[in-house]
Image (cartoon, rainbow, N blue to C red):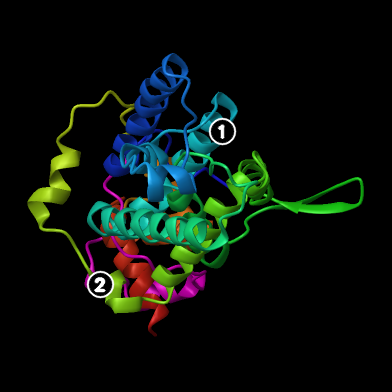
């Protein structure tokens, strides 16, 4: 797995903002919780009796412990590939839907179960993280397989192991938020209320792109905003190349960052390279070539 294409938060401003916010909230709420001897996370008492609504905000962003923060940030960073695939606007809708639905499911579960052992659900963006495992499982192809002591693994195995570690980090306290996140991701996948077609007004989505958070810049062009995955036959590129500019000269090769961006979307390396050659290293045009070739 190439870790979601080019390194850093290039073409992923929403993910960058969410990761920074999650880190800051973990520190701030962690300090407040220690000074006031409070326990981060949702509980039946907090929501239905004490009406501590601030814990709803804390549970969306702040992790309960440093190990959970490390695994959570790693997964959020990896899943930036989905923002690059569908675009920052639709990814913002995905985040909002995942967070709200998973949070509602957690509150309903606490109200119905009233389990004394669930004195407090663990805190953190479990809804968003485990919602992202749904498209990760269904859309991201396996690119490498290997064996260790007769056990078969793939490049996706490390992401699953990190998710499993986070899911079981606090046993039932973390399993319930994780399962609620998977349900939220499945509902988004099923496109209930046509949620996958919804967009925010452009001025809201572009606000995060203008935030001057420090990040590693990459020279790769903007990633396309289409979420269509799959391997394309190499010869299919030639069927649509006539609609685009003349290809690069034989001495010019497409940049590795551009190839990596297309591979992260599920296209095989050879098809990605050929499309970039005929698109003069323009990722958007190359994506159109690959998508059009799928329809032939």
* Left/right of residue 208 with respect to residue 190 in the rendered view: left
Q: Residue 152, position in %: x, y?
A: 81, 55
Give me the residue at 54% from left, 41% from top: 120
On residue 68, which mark appears? 1
Q: Any magenta on residue 153?
A: no
Name the residue rendered at 39%, 69% in the picture. 188
- SS at circle 2: helix
Q: Quadrant of the C terminus?
A: bottom left
In this picture, residue 203 sits left or right of residue 143: left
Q: Nearer the viewer, residue 199 or 192?
A: 192
Which portion, as a residue range, is magenta?
220-246
Closer to the chain start, of discs 2 and 1, is 1
Q: Residue 197 bears which disc, if any?
A: 2
Q: Examine the residues drawn in magenta and state their main secondary structure.
A: loop
Residue 210 image-quadrant placement: top left
Within 10 angstroms of label 2, few (less than 14), some, or many (20 or more) residues?
few
Is residue 160 in view? Answer: yes
Q: Residue furthest right?
A: 150
Q: Could you say which quadrant of the image residue 279 lies in?
A: bottom left
């Amino acid at each position: 797995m190439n870790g979601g294409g080019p390194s850093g938060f290039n073409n992923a401003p929403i993910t960058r903002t969410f990761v920074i916010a999650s880190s800051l909230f973990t520190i701030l709420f962690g300090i407040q919780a220690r000074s006031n001897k409070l326990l981060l996370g949702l509980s039946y008492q907090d929501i239905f009796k004490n009406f501590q609504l601030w814990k709803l905000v804390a549970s969306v962003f702040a992790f309960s412990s440093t190990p959970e923060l490390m695994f959570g940030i790693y997964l959020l960073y990896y899943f930036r590939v989905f923002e690059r695939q569908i675009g920052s606007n639709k990814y913002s809708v995905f985040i909002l839907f995942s967070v709200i639905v998973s949070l509602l499911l957690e509150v309903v579960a606490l109200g119905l179960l009233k389990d004394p052992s669930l004195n407090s659900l663990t805190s953190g963006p479990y809804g968003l993280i485990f919602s992202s495992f749904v498209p990760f499982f269904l859309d991201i192809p396996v690119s490498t397989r290997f064996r260790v002591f007769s056990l078969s693994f793939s490049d996706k195995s490390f992401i699953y192991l990190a998710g499993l570690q986070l899911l079981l980090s606090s046993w039932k306290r973390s399993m319930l938020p994780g399962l609620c996140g998977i349900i939220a991701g499945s509902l988004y996948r099923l496109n209930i209320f046509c949620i996958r077609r919804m967009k925010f007004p452009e001025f809201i989505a572009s606000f995060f792109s203008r935030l001057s958070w420090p990040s590693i810049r990459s020279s790769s062009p903007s990633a396309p905003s289409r979420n269509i995955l799959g391997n394309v036959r190499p010869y299919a590129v030639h069927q649509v190349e006539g609609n685009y500019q003349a290809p690069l000269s034989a001495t010019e090769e497409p940049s590795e960052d551009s190839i990596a961006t297309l591979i992260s979307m599920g296209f095989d390396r050879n098809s990605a390279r050929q499309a970039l050659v005929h698109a003069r290293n323009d990722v958007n045009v190359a994506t159109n070539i690959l998508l059009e070739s799928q329809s032939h």
